[in-house]
Every structure is written in C-alpha cells, then in structure tokens.
Amino acid sequence: MIEELTSLEDERLDVFLRLTEVQLRNKLEPEKGIFIAESAKVISRALDAGYDPIAALMPFNKLGSHAALIERLEFAHPGITVFTAPDSLIQQLTGYELTRGVLVAFRRKVLPAVGDIIAGARRVAILEDITNHTNIGALFRSAAALGVDAIILNQGCCDPLYRRAIRVSMGTVFQVPWTRLDSFDAPASSAVSLLQEKAMAKKKSHVYAAREWPAQTLHQLKEAGFVTCALALKDDSIQLSDTRLKEADKLAMVFGTEGEGLIDETIALCDYTVKIPMKHGVDSLNVAAASAVTFWELCN
C-alpha cells in the first residue's frame, strides 16, 4: 500500500527518522529488532535472504523506477506500507538526500548457533573486537566475493546490520552465513551513543574471554576438524603462503581489532600464527585489507 506522507510527526516513521541504531536493534524484543537497508540492490539481497520487510520510504519520483521492488516488498509482506513524499520533504525528514532512492525497515532474524553455520563449511572467518562498521562491511564484501563460507563475530564486534556496515557490504551481509557469540544487550536508550556502545562491547569482550571466546569457540572449531590460524605479527609467525594453510581441508582464519590486534589468549589457542609479507617497513594492514588478501590466498 502506497501512502503519501501528510505529517512529519507520524510515529510510524520513527524507524527511519528518530530511533538510534541501538534502539532499532532492541525495538519490541532484541530477537525481533529492526534494521534499515537502502538501495534497490541491497534491499533485493535482503529479500532474497528471507528477511521480512515491515515498511518502506521513497520519494515520489522513484515510485516508477522502483515498481518491481515495490511488488516484491508487497509479495514478501502483504499490506506493507510504502511511505512517499516529494524529495524535499523526505530530505527534511531524514536530513539528507536519498541518493539511492529507497529505505526499507526489516525485522532481524534469530542468529544461528555456531555449529549450524560451520556445518559443511571449509573456510570460516572469525572476528575479534572489530568495532569499525566500515571495516565490517568491507570484510563481508570480500568474504562473499572470495569464497568464505561463514563468519563468526565475538562479543566485542560491532553490528553487521548497522546501516553503514550494510551499505559498505553492498548487502553481502545477507549472503554470507554469520553469527555472533553473544546477543547484543546494550540498553535501548537514545542516551547511549555509538562510542559508548563500542566501549561497552570492548569491555564485555574481555570479560567473556575465558568463557565462550576464545577458548570454547576455538575448541569447538577444532573438534569439527578446523585448523585455526591467527593473523598476527609474532616471532613464530609463518608466511601467509605456507602450504600447510592452503592445503588444510577446513581452515578458520582469526582477525583482530584495528588497533590492538588479537588478544594473547586467542593467538596462543590457534594452531598457527600467520603474517602477510609487506615491504617498505609497513608492519600492518587495515583489517579489511588484510582479510581480503588472506581470503584471496587461502579461499581459492
């Protein structure tokens, strides 16, 4: 159902305009939270993955070009409301021009168990305390393109369904199976800033270090037949091109936070510590770049 906007105060627009990412994630119930996707390609990938759309927002002048997408949305969720208005009004509502033409609010899914996403997988990426949404999105995009079968995020990682992460990934967050080791539990309050959320996640990650991450999860992967390798610069690091990695039937690649890297316990629990050869005195790469190089070398 297409509905023209008549009031900027319509509470049904809160999901697009007035709720923070934390509030969206916890709306109603955490396991039934909401995320926002933008652009026809990204939204189509979310629909392909079976996510349930609950509302859409697009300018008048995009209704014709997005007719097929509107039809898909209505098929996926009969009775869905597609809010529309002139460009100028939508820009007043959102604070920016909808250059990609459409926003859609989707319900989140319950995350799968680790055992479910590694069943049948041969190449798995594990992320520890990565808190930059751009890096998360770029990493997912590389993973989808280069053959990673699943991604596991620890408690300290930021949300792959944050709007910027989705946008940078070009919707590949809906294509690569993934899970998180602990549910997001930041309070649904506008007073909680993104920086505060990251700080809480970082602190919580190390509190949990002796429990599910890293010991329990890495043990579970080894029990399932995975060789584990930590990307880190250590005296005993082997080269990324080492044939033992490429020839492993099942391989789990572990990447750490942008600044501090992996915690010592994680490195100690992995079978190998691995480094990427670099020149000109450079000793590290951005985690998005490092993961792309690693996936290219070990997943093809």
Image: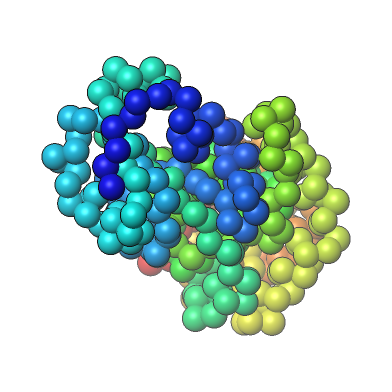
Number of dots carrying numbers: 0
Q: Position of residue 172 (x, y in %)?
A: 39, 54
Q: Can residue 277 be seen at all in this image of the molecule?
A: no
Residue 98, above or below 45: above
Q: For this rendering, which residue is in front, 197 or 148?
A: 197
Indicate the position of residue 157 as horizontal and vertical percent values: 65, 47
In the picture, measured across the screen, residue 185 lies left or right of residue 253, that is right
Quadrant placement of the C terminus: bottom left
Q: In the displayed structure, would residue 9 be above or below residue 165?
A: above
In front of the other: 206 or 162: 162
Judging depth in this view, the residue of 194 and 223 nearest the camera is 194
Q: Looking at the image, which residue is at 41% across and 40% down?
A: 168
What residue is drawn where x is 58% and y is 64%? 110
Can you give x and y, in whole percent of width and height, for residue 254 in the image?
62, 58
Q: Is residue 55 left or right of residue 122?
A: left
| Residue 94 located left or right of residue 233 | left
Q: Quadrant of residue 270?
A: bottom right
Going 39% across and 64% down the picture, which residue do you hit?
A: 50
Q: Is residue 188 above or below residue 120?
A: above
Residue shown at 53% from the left, 61% from the top: 109
